[in-house]
Amino acid sequence: MTEALRRFPDGLPDQLLELDALPLLRELGRPTLIRVPGHGDLPPRAITTLLHGDESTGLQATLRILRRRRREPFDLYVVLGNVQAAAEPPGFAHRYLDGQEDMNRIFDGAPTTTAQREAAEAIRAELLASGLAALVDVHNNTGNNPFYAIVTNDRPATLNLATLLTTTVVRWEFRLDTLLDALDERVVTCALECGLPGRSASLRFAVDALRRYLGEDHLPTDRLQRDADVLGRLRRVTVHDDARVRFGGVLDGTADLVLPPDGDVHNFTEVSAGHLVGYVPPTGALPVSVTDADGRDVTADSLAREGDRLVLTRDAVPIMMTRSEDAVRRDCLFYLAEPLPSLSNRT
Ligand SMILES: [Zn+2]
């Protein structure tokens, strides 16, 4: 039987490393774990990417780093997640395939009923067994956002890792059975969000950040090293499954929610109560819901309808607003956040 996870314990062979990204993925064929042996005795580190198949920047940055064939003073693990979705023509077009699950939502320790869940469990188990010290999970966004890091706790080591990479940090309070959720008790982790895929600035940022990550021998755990802008107290805005959503155009009876095509320009900026989210029919149930990290429905406390305008009821910082109908369906519309006190005041 074919193993769900493909393994390369001594690095990626030269003939594979020389391939372009898509031919490489087609050759790999399934989730892949690569271990690049190091020369020192520092505990291993990991880079994970492609947990979402339409996010190409992390793979391209990682390949650029691997092709330099540096040996670090630690073993470097590289995980390529949803290889099948990424390789599916025309390439990097699917977050996950029909019949699959979102690969960054299945690290829940449940029985491995599918090949995809088997691969996820093997990744989790193998990384933990390696004595991993740190992990950076590289993603793209589906809308315009600044580059930022996501942390799932506010321990100094975690924040030091995040601020080594960038200066905008989102404190993630939801548990979504992500890879970070599965590891963050035992490993210093953060996600690196590299803007839209396919842009040279996104790739440049990812390469810079990963080089800093690999080049820093010690990640202090006792004190915060750098300040950053931190956002938290997240509320998740989702669109109901049966709602018809459209970006742009007017409300004309063929849509239950019409979103401004450029709604993502407000990502990571403070907007005031009354800020327009989109247009909805003036009567009937709202096509969206808002939930907080405790799972409470906070729709009425977050959104209001004024005629056919759907607006925010309070000052907030919208983040991760998408411009993709597919992302609305498969994930969410955006999050509402609040600025948290600066890190330097917390020491
Ligand atoms: Zn992602």
Image: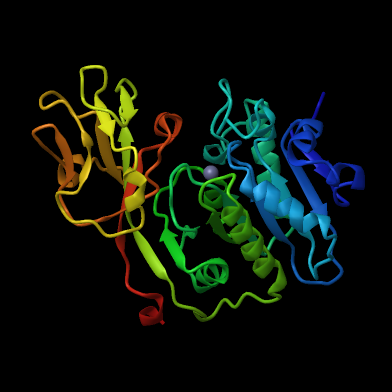
Where 2 sits versus 319, above or below? above
Q: In the figure, residue 334 lies in which quadrant?
A: top left
The chosen color scheme is rainbow
Where 187 sits versus 88, above or below? below
- Disc tally is 0
Give left or right: position of 150 versus 20: left
**Picture coordinates of residue 92, whole percent (x, y):** 62, 35
Give left or right: position of 195 versus 15: left
**Residue at left offset 24%, top offset 40%:** 297
The quadrant of the rendering that contains the N terminus is: top right
Q: In the figure, residue 27 lies in which quadrant?
A: top right
**Residue at left offset 80%, top offset 71%:** 73
The quadrant of the rendering that contains the C terminus is: bottom left
**Picture coordinates of residue 25, whole percent (x, y):** 75, 35
- Is residue 302 among what the camera can see? yes
Q: In the figure, residue 256 lies in which quadrant?
A: top left
- Is residue 125 among what the camera can see? no
Where 135 sits versus 265, above or below? below
Give left or right: position of 82 versus 335: right
**Picture coordinates of residue 342, whole percent (x, y):** 36, 75
**Residue at left offset 20%, top offset 33%:** 279
- Residue farthest along the top direction in this orientation: 254
Residue sitting nearer the eye, 7 or 51: 51
**Picture coordinates of residue 206, whole percent (x, y):** 62, 58
